[in-house]
Image: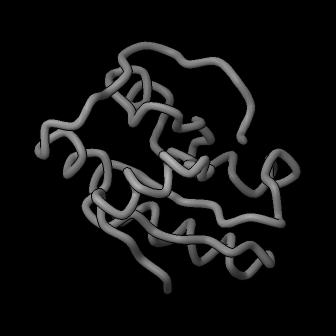
Amino acid sequence: MPEIDIDQLATALEQGATLVDVRETREYVDAHVPGAVSIPMGQLTARLDELDRSSPVHVVCASGNRSAAMTDVLTAQGFDAVNVVGGTAAWVRAGRPVVRGPETGAPR
């Protein structure tokens, strides 16, 4: 499974990458990576039509476990999916900016 670290994620986001946060809504609202779109793990397969199959989808959770599983699901569905190792926790530990509260908008 393709994986990237948070430094590679930051670069990808600067280039307009799609980032899907598969944590529960409560976790997402507490703090998430800027630009991340919330699609909780339990809703992902029902919401595949919201994602662009023509570009990579980066997947993040709290630590990288749930996102690894959802990266496998997306790959099986034909997406170019990439897991973010260390997840949001690594992003926060590195002192990178986070958004608190809901963020509106569709996946890009």
Horizontally, is 42 left or right of 36 in the view? right
The image position of residue 27, as x and y in percent, is: 37, 31
Horizontally, is 58 left or right of 5 in the view? right
- Please, which residue is most extreme toward the top here? 101
> Is 37 above or below relative to 78?
above
Residue found at x 13% / y 37%? 95
> Is 88 above or below relative to 76?
above
Instruction: Name which quarter of the figure residue 101 lies in.
Output: top left
Instruction: Name which quarter of the figure residue 81 lies in.
Output: bottom right
> Is 13 above or below relative to 80?
above
- Please, which residue is most extreme toward the front here? 15
Residue found at x 50% / y 45%? 21
Q: 32 or 4: which is nearer to us?
A: 4
Residue found at x 62% / y 50%? 18
Q: What colour scheme governs how the chains and residues are painted in the rendered image of this protein? A: one colour
The image position of residue 33, as x and y in percent, is: 39, 36
The image position of residue 75, as x and y in percent, is: 68, 78
Q: 41 or 38: which is nearer to us?
A: 38
Q: 53 or 47: which is nearer to us?
A: 53
- Please, which residue is most extreme toward the bottom here? 1
The image position of residue 69, as x and y in percent, is: 50, 71
- Quarter of the picture containing the C terminus is top right
> Is 46 above or below relative to 30?
below
